[in-house]
Amino acid sequence: METKQAKMCGEEKIHAINNILLEWWRESGRQLPWRKNRSLYGTVLSECMLQQTRVSVAIPYFLRWMERFPSFTATAEAPEEEILLLWSGLGYYSRARNFQKLCQKIVKMEQFPETPREWQQLPGIGPYSAAAIASIGQNYDAIALDGNVLRILIRLHADWLPRETFRDKNLAAKNLQLLIEVMKIPGRCGAIGEALMDFGTEICTPRGPKCNSCPIEKFCSLKKLNLSAATIPHFSKATRPPVHVHRLWCRGIGGIWLVRSQRSRLRDFYELPVLSEKFLSLPVIHTFRRTICGICYVEHVHDFDGSAALSPFFPTETDENAQIIAVEDLNKIPISGPHRQCIGKILAEKEK
């Protein structure tokens, strides 16, 4: 293939890397549940769950989901509250709603989407997920380009890439598009994509890469340039100050005061109510952090063991979304993972 990049980095080198990686993957690839019993539905579900989530965290959720909702139709017809409850703890809850909307659209289609462009028309599916679903689930000739793949390709071909590529993820993706085209093997792109994902997780890791165990070390341009793989690439990230949130722990008769969130990302999830600023003198009994869309929230939980009646400390006295939830019913309602862990720790501490 006559492309500028193919000439610069060499088609033979690219094809040799592909063959070695595929052989390595056959012997050392991860045994994941969505690979054990492959289906298009399982592929779509796993890709939606893996957005912003580590594989080790997603696996138990995937297994529970497949047991409860084993098909597009089952998910499409499920009550939303049950969808949110099963997703509870996985974070980024718009993914759950989008996945159900996707299933509802698919069951009305005469045939499945067949290309990345068609998959991108469905809720919650971006360019990476669309390429991954089409290539892995339908054998379409596309290679999904995520952070893992970017990191590997930059390290392998650093000798001809502009230095800015080491620091800017968007520029890296743009500069590597032609190289991605050269990498494609008809009928094998899904396997190449999965091999690259596993290789970036097991060998060519962000920090502490296992260069001594790397089957394609001889092709790595960083050695020729005498650059440390642990520092290349170094994509810059915008830093934002943490946001502090103050919440209330209040026990009424029979349970804990919770509020059903109306925020778009956590809509209909229960959480501890936000405390009015004038009552911040109440003692803090627990502090936890969580990150939403790149913003770190530091949440301070203040203690008020009130009576059955709403106390003057309670910030949402007339809020119809506020209610007492019995401890034994906490597992029956959708609660975000950080709040569920927080409630469990406070209950355990109170029982000592």
Image (cartoon, rainbow, N blue to C red):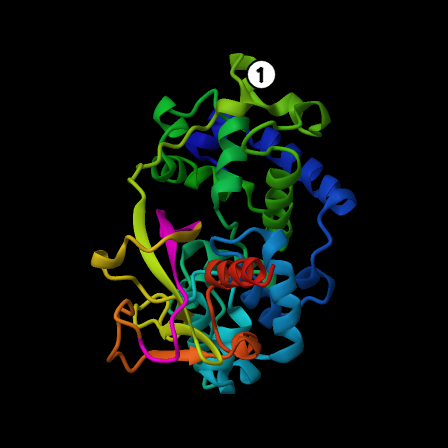
Q: Main secondary structure of the magenta part?
A: strand
Q: Is residue 334 left or right of residue 301?
A: right
Name the residue at 48% across, 73% down. Answer: 334
**Residue 312: x, y in percent?**
25, 70
Q: Is residue 71 depicted above or below 187 in this figure?
A: below
Q: Is residue 173 depicted above or below 84 in this figure?
A: above
Q: Quadrant of residue 169?
A: top left
Q: Is residue 302 left or right of residue 25?
A: left
Q: What span is colored magenta in the figure?
A: 288-310
Comparing 133 with 260, the one in front is 260
| Type of the residue with mark 1 | Lys
Q: Is residue 161 left or right of residue 203?
A: left
Is residue 70 visible in the rendered image? The answer is no
Is residue 151 visible in the rendered image? The answer is yes
Q: Is residue 249 magenta?
A: no
Q: Is residue 302 left or right of residue 11?
A: left
Comparing 41 with 231, the one in front is 231
Q: Is residue 177 depicted above or below 69 in this figure?
A: above
Q: Is residue 24 depicted above or below 57 in this figure?
A: above
Which residue reaches farthest right?
27
Name the residue at 54% across, 63% down. Answer: 347
Q: Quadrant of residue 98?
A: bottom left
Q: Is residue 304 magenta?
A: yes
Where's the C terminus, which quadrant?
Answer: bottom right
**Residue 351: x, y in percent?**
59, 63
- The residue beneath circle 1 is 223
Name the residue at 62% across, 24% down. Answer: 219
